[in-house]
Image (cartoon, grey):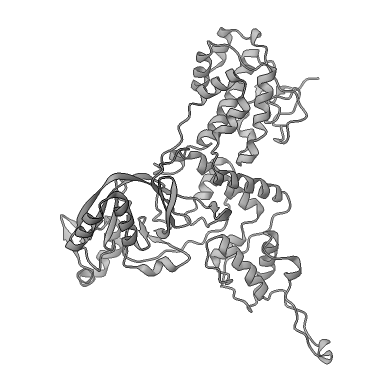
Amino acid sequence: MRKALVCVSLTALALAGCDKGGGNGGGASGGQSVSVSPQQVSAADLQAAVTDPRAKKFYEARGWAAVWDDAHARDLTAAFADAGRHGLQGQAFIKEVKQGATPAEREAAMTLNALDYAQALAQGVANPKKVFDPYTVPGNDTDVAGGLAQAVQKGNVREWLASLAPQDDEYKALSEAYVRYAAASKGPQRQPIQPGDKIAPGDKDARVPQIVAALRGGGYLPADQAQPQAQPQPQSAKKAAAQPDANSYTKAMAAAVAKVQQDYGIKPDGIIGNSTLEALNSGAGERARILAVNLERRRWLNRQAPATRIDVNTAATVLTYWKDGQAKDRRVVVAGQPDWETPEIGAPMVSLVANPDWTIPEKIAKEEILPKGAAYMAKEQITTKNGRLVQASGDKSALGIVKFNMADPYAIYLHDTPGKAAFGQPERHQSHGCVRVNDAIGFARMLADDEGVRDRFEQALATHKETDVPIPNKIPVRLLYHTAYLDGGKVVFRGDPYGWDDKLAAALGLGGPLRHRVVQHVHEMGP
């Protein structure tokens, strides 16, 4: 007897007589793809069945002719089987067709599946502007309805769908890593290691067995190094010798932890603090989900990034200056701390400001400056101008001696800082949202050379007064948040200081939280 529903599954589009939700999202075997005979679908019936604007555009271009005969249906089915390589949940793109659906309704459902999957690959599953506010990084713009129409005509639907995802080396590396970790996550999952006191070599701590398990699970510690080794003792003392303490943190373990720290951008000293515990808690399942959200972030981006641009990865606190398609410079930065996050925005850099004044944001003024009193403000060269607190340019200025002015409505920009020590610290989320640049004056001179305004910039510096030096060619700046990325040919992971991995995972239906977060705040003056 036939079941009540025909389920449109990831791997077979529709399996006759399956239970509702019975598709397993696995390989492409075990079912017949539901096709339609285009001759059975009239234009009038198809117009009545189609409600999605993209599908209407698709069919209008075809004169409302049906598509999904056996050949095209098989091609689409084969394309859906690759969804897992992109960290996508295949069943999310599948629409169920009720038993007894007309050929026109089956046709319309299959087109909608194809368009949804195409849009996920081309632009992402989630709309970043609905998940994060603000979000203004330029995105990818693809006409999926027009593209599908051309692919159908050429008979290469599967190839066209595959081409919609990013094709760069980083996306491919993240995809391959996702597949590996997703496969490794099928086994039992470890309990997270709880935060607490730091652990140094020689210390004893009840969490050490969990740490050992995490190191072994990540491939950082061979099994024969998992337990501390007892020191050789005279025969007479062997009977009285205690067995090695499973809670002892050894040098071998510390060496393995240092490798973890290296991969996560933490100071590789082998000492276990809360940031290192966060990294150790990222088992195969957690890493797979971290990779899935980072694959989604790459799908949001314009496939043709400007050849000359500045990218700041605020999660990793690293800036990369691209000149004519080549990475010309890379340096560390300080980004916003939790609750003062650096937003994901895209905006052009329009000028170099020598000796900038700092008009202090009202929230910082109210909460952090005014309570310190007039004597503090005088010492820091802060006065009131037009009802706002302003710090004068000079050696006290929180902006240092150069500001990289950006045309954005959020008062977010790159700048120098007198607080140079922060650049040498492993945790560099310490600002109030703006981006502090290491050796900012050297970076400004590099840009001034490339833009042909070096003489004007040096003259502006010599005035010791705020002076704006326009950049002839505006440089696009992208403030991104990537917690997994390709570095030196290797996929590396970084922490999630803002909790934005968790937020995006929830929007994608991946569950969460992905990992334990330890929120720390730094109280110092500066944007």
Left/right placement of residue 449 relative to residue 261 reads left
Q: Residue 76, image x and y in percent? A: 65, 25
Q: Residue at x 49, y 18 (%)?
A: 57
Q: Residue at x 55, y 36 (%)?
A: 165
Indicate the position of residue 204 as horizontal and vertical percent values: 65, 77
Q: Is residue 380 left or right of residue 20?
A: left
Q: Find residue 369 and report its horizontal and vertical position in percent.
A: 27, 64
Q: Quadrant of the C terminus?
A: bottom left
Q: Residue at x 72, y 49 (%)?
A: 186
In the picture, which quadrant includes the N terminus? top right
Residue lying farthest left? 386
Q: In this orientation, does residue 218 appear?
A: yes
Location of residue 267 with respect to 437 vertically, above or below = below
341 or 75: nearer the viewer: 75
Q: Quadrant of residue 243?
A: bottom right
Query: Does residue 384 sit above or below 413 in this rendering?
Result: below
Q: With 150 as the anchor, is 443 left or right in this view?
A: left
Q: Count of labels shown?
A: 0
Name the residue: 53% across, 64% down: 266
Asked if one can make out residue 464 in the rendered structure from this viewpoint, the answer is: no
Residue 424: quadrant of the picture: bottom left
Image x and y of residue 69, in percent: 67, 16
